[in-house]
Amino acid sequence: MDNPYDLWENPEWSRRKFIQDDNDDDGRNVDGKAESFTGNGFFLRLPNLMDKYVILTAAHNVMSEGKRSFDVKLMYNNPFEADPNDPTKVRYANGTVPQAIITLDIDNTDKSNDVHICSAYMKGVPVGDYAAICIPRKLGEPRGFAFSVKLALRSSFEGNVHVSGFRTTMMKTLRPVTSSAAKLIYHGDYVEYRAKTEVGISGSPVWVEYKGYPTVVAVHNNGPEDPDNPRNGSRGALLTVDLLRDVFEWLDSKLLLKGIQIQVRQQDLDKSSTYRAAGRKLFLNFQTNSDFGRVRLDSGTKFDWMLAQVDSQNVYYILSVVGQRKWVKFNLAASKYQGVELSENLNGKGCLLLNLEEARRAWVILAVETGTIENGAPKRVQLRMEGNRVKTYDAQFESAEVSLMSSKGKNPFYKLVMTT
């Protein structure tokens, strides 16, 4: 497994916040003055976000006593290597800042576009203790931890669990320190773990090895309720569908597309004058049949499209019905025209979708992996939508011509567009 520290994950920051009580948590009298604190965070791997990096952290790192912290400074490692042209010198990943640690001032005012704090936490709900920070992206620099919503859908995890962060009790180094333990205990929107933590590392990534790659599961935000009780563990906010959706919605990016319809590319429909749907729009639809998808003229079901998993090889998405916790699933075991279903279990097979087309294209080709290898590569099946059987005089304007095919062949109806 790759060394996670080589991925340049962990930023650290200092910030100041007003203490409204007479004494702070350590019993020191601060007389209402500003006190300095430190915390941790980590970069989230978002390949499609080209102009910025996203850092997740604990909300209480950037907010306290109902007020945003001020004078927030973000510090992160600038990876470097020996200069091949001069071994006595080093070459930095960000060559415009030739230093080992980069420091940025973060705008954390109420009107800031750089910091997003979970709205539930701002209303006093402790389980929403997470926040996101944006900084400009430098091309060529590493991007951060992999993630998967599937890790938030488990009931247990029995493997090794790690928490990596800069420790306040140790000399500050260029690399975070990692503590490890076995097992994650799931409690709804948060997890519990017995890896050693301490004051000052809130916001650190809680990560595991998943598919052979360091993958973040949660944002560390609380130590054990009773440190003397060996049964009590530290806690972190799970990277659930809702947490990621909240962050992606704030980013206002293509990581989350809301209220879209899946439509066959119009020029493919219009190529044949004998095609019944020529000149009409053809959509994926579950409105009249919730058991499996159908094609419908003129309108279809509205979906939300969201990034759901990034690993060392691929980027995966989920497609949910607007306003419902139902996800599109490709069922490889179903009969030909009944393989595209709606599922309430996102953790099952066939719900993580690939876009096989290049990101800059105006269309997508949706596919899932079959779990088998063909010609040395993972075998995939693709969604195909047709309308040869659509009868325009039928009041429903529908047919069951939604299928999964292992290859494109000569049929053009794999290219789909997402319209609003």
Image (cartoon, helix red, strand yellow):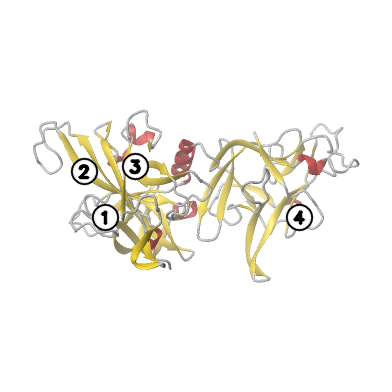
Q: Which mark is residue 127?
A: 3
| CA distance separating discs 1 and 3 | 23 Å
Image coordinates for residue 286, horizontal then vertical, percent: 68, 40
- Amino acid type at mark 4: Lys
Relative to the observer, which residue lies in front, 194 or 268? Answer: 268
Mark 2 surroundings within 10 Å by alpha-carbon count, few (fewer than 14), some (14 through 19), many (20 or more) = some
Rendered location of residue 304, percent (x, y): 58, 39
Q: Is residue 63 left or right of residue 316?
A: left
Q: Which residue is mark 4?
A: 336
Between the residue at mark 4 and the residue at mark 2, the CA separation in whole angstroms equals: 60 Å
Circle nearer the N terminus (1, 3):
3
Q: Give the structural element (helix, strand or loop) at label 4.
A: helix
* Residue mark closest to the camera, 3 vs 2: 2
Quarter of the image with the C terminus is top right
| Marks 4/1: CA–CA distance | 54 Å
Asked if disc 4 and disc 2 are in contact, CB closer than 8 Å, the reply is no
Q: Amino acid at mark 1?
A: Phe
Q: Nearer the viewer, mark 4 or mark 2?
A: 2
Q: Quadrant of the N terminus?
A: bottom left
Q: Residues within 10 Å of mark 1 (few under 14, many from 20)?
A: many
Q: Please name the amino acid that badge 2 sits on.
A: Phe
Report if residue 5 is visible in the image: no
> Which residue is labeled 1 in the image?
166
**Pointer 3: residues within 10 angstroms few (<14), some, or many (20+)?**
some
Report x, y in % for residue 261.
66, 37
Q: Earlier in the sequence, mark 3 or mark 4?
A: 3
Q: Which residue is mark 2?
A: 37
Sequence-first disc among 2 and 1: 2
